Amino acid sequence: MMMNLFSIFDPMSSIFSISLNWMSTFLGIFFIPKIYWFIPSRTNIIFSKISMNLHSELKTLLGPQSFKKGSTLIFLTLFYMIVFNNFLGLFPYIFTSTSHLITTISWALPLWLSFMLYGWLKNTNHMFAHLVPQNTPPILMSFMVLIETVSNLIRPLTLSVRLTANMIAGHLLVTLLSSTGMLISQYLTFMLVLIQILLLMLESAVAIIQAYVFMILMTLYSSEVN
């Protein structure tokens, strides 16, 4: 492992030639509440309420024409997977898989590609109409087609880079503040601990917000092709 500031994002720690750091991605399975209870637990009730609220919001974004029974499950699954991995990265000695492009782009690229293929094969005229916004002057139509095409092509990259950059930025800030603990006086240590607690609360909010933004943007991309 590289002994520098970015070594906390190095996924190459392994035993018996198995990269065990990537196994942290599957730890979220153990946090999913069980549904086979005679009396639902509080965790299960909270989990169900969050799912129903997100389901109603996604149903509104998809619209009555594109919404079908079960169509929001893939976006809810994506949201919970990103939230679990973001929160697990806040615990000590747990590898943050969402801080690597190989993970985030593997979520964004297949979904975006499937939406584009479905749109161009099933709704070709609709996809062509999206390339030219309404009330565009005829002289600017060719430029708008080029701009809209480039913006559509970079969507999976912007989605993955946004999530990765936010995870890396927060973790680097926590690491930088932690490394100064041995260099400051005892009186300033209390302030450092307080700042770390506030920063941890901020990172918890960022973990939820970034997963929510990822899910909403992917839902909007899906609604555009229908």
Image (tube, rainbow, N blue to C red):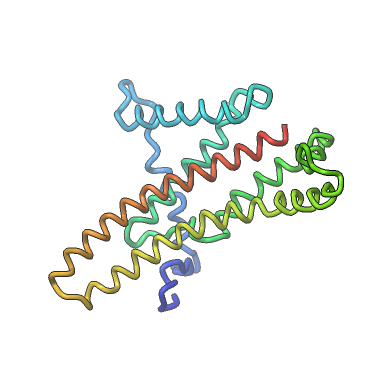
On the image, the x and y values in percent for residue 209 come to 44, 45
Q: Residue at x 40, y 27 (%)?
A: 49
Q: Which picture quadrant has residue 221?
A: top right
Residue most toward the left?
Answer: 187
Residue nearer the viewer, 113 or 144? 144
Q: Which picture quadrant has residue 111?
A: top right
On the image, the x and y values in percent for residue 120 come to 80, 40
On the image, the x and y values in percent for residue 180 come to 27, 74
Q: Residue at x 56, y 60 (%)?
A: 101
Q: Residue at x 50, y 68 (%)?
A: 17
Left-right relation of 170 to 117: left
Left-right relation of 148 to 34: right
Q: Is residue 79 visible?
A: yes
On the image, the x and y values in percent for residue 18 come to 49, 64
- Whether 89 is drawn above or below 49: the answer is below
- Whether 209 is drawn above or below 181: the answer is above
Left-right relation of 115 to 199: right
- Report the label total: 0
- Whether 28 is drawn above or below 10: the answer is above
Q: Is residue 16 visible?
A: no
Q: Which picture quadrant has residue 69?
A: top right
Q: Residue at x 30, y 21 (%)?
A: 39
Quadrant (top left, top right, bottom left, bottom right) of the N terminus: bottom left
Quadrant (top left, top right, bottom left, bottom right) of the C terminus: top right
